[in-house]
Image: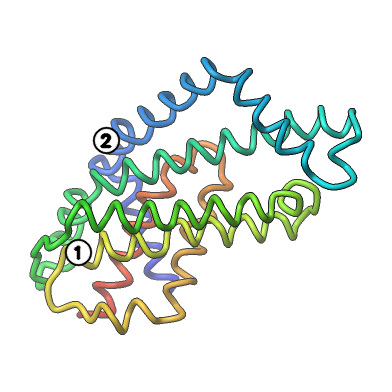
């Protein structure tokens, strides 16, 4: 597992990957920032209405005001990560194939991915993420440590299934069913999700997960 992480870290800082991140990651990041800036008042009001519906604490004015601002920041940050996830899932395959040919030249490349299926898994994971995010929102915001652990688990859910499909469908002779059910896939997803907690480097998180999954899948298939 350590070697897989080390290989992925080396790849993430290669010129090819940095160029991709600059074009896709940063453009998504600043695009969402601009969008939130333009609608911030309405966005904050919506979050405030959600806070006011929380039993007991939602009716306390100073708690509502402070929590609304904090939750607006958390929700805005979450939206940024979701958009970057979606954009990366659409444009990452070429990067992954290029890296795979470099590290695993004996693995046959055959892109059998379908954008509709990729979007299905991405939207499915995003929907599950959002539902669980709303359910666990009080814990995430008000319970230190445990809230961050829950959030890490939610990020892993967002990454795991879509990333596995996008990567595994690019190559032949991959035992997809066996690998998909492996418990170690959750470890890979959790490791990738930790990048979301590192400022600036969190822009790398989605693509880092693709590269991490690539090394794991192809390493197990060689």
Q: Is residue 38 above or below residue 142?
A: above
Name the side, left or right, on which 143 lies relative to 17.
Answer: right
Q: Position of residue 115 (x, y in %)?
A: 20, 51
Horizontal arrangement in the rendering, residue 2 relative to residue 133 (left or right):
left
Place of residue 202 in the rendered image (x, y in percent of width and height, measured from the top left): 49, 43
Task: Tell me: residue 113, above or below residue 73.
Answer: below
Q: What's the colour scheme?
A: rainbow
Which of the pair 165/133 is nearer the observer? 133
Cβ atoms at labels 2 and 1 below 8 Å apart: no
The residue wearing badge 2 is: 19
Q: Secondary structure at mark 2?
A: helix
Classify mark 1: residues with Cα within 10 Å, few (<14), some (14-19) or many (20+).
few
Cα gap from disc 2 to disc 1, whole angstroms: 19 Å
| Quarter of the image with the N terminus in it | bottom left
What is the crowding at mark 2: few (fewer than 14 residues within 10 Å), some, or many (at least 20)?
few
Question: Quadrant location of the C terminus?
Answer: bottom left
> Residue 58 placed where, x, y %?
84, 39
Q: Quadrant of residue 52?
A: top right
Q: Position of residue 134 (x, y in %)?
A: 64, 49
In the rendered structure, the answer to whether residue 85 lies left or right of residue 43 reads left
> Residue at horizontal 26%, vertical 35%?
19
Q: Secondary structure at mark 1?
A: helix
User: Considering only order in the chain, which callout, 1 or 2, is on the residue closer to the N terminus?
Assistant: 2
Residue name at image x 77 percent, y 41 percent: 53
Front of the two marks 2 and 1: 2
Residue on which disc 1 sits: 103
Task: Judge left or right: residue 147 versus residue 101.
Answer: right
Residue positioned 58% across, 62% down in the render: 153
Q: Does 49 sit above or below residue 186?
A: above
Viewer-proximal residue, 94 or 36? 36
């Amino acid at each position: 597992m350590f070697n897989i992480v080390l290989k992925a870290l080396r790849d993430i800082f290669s010129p090819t990957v940095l160029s991709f991140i600059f074009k896709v990651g940063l453009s998504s990041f600043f695009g969402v920032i601009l969008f939130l800036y333009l609608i911030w008042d309405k966005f904050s009001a919506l979050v405030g209405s959600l806070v006011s519906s929380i039993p007991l604490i939602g009716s306390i004015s100073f708690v509502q005001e402070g929590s609304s601002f904090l939750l607006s920041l958390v929700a805005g940050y979450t939206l940024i990560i979701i958009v970057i996830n979606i954009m990366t899932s659409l444009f990452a395959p070429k990067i992954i194939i290029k890296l795979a040919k470099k590290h695993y030249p004996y693995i046959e490349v055959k892109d059998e991915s379908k954008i509709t299926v990729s979007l299905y898994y991405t939207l499915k994971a995003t929907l599950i993420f959002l539902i669980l995010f709303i359910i666990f929102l009080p814990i995430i915001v008000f319970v230190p440590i445990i809230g961050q652990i829950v959030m890490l688990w939610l990020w892993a859910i967002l990454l795991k299934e879509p990333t596995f499909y996008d990567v595994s469908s690019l190559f032949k002779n991959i035992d997809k069913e066996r690998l998909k059910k492996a418990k170690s896939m959750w470890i890979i997803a959790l490791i990738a999700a930790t990048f979301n907690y590192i400022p600036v480097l969190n822009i790398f998180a989605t693509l880092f997960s693709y590269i991490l999954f690539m090394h794991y899948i192809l390493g197990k298939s060689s």
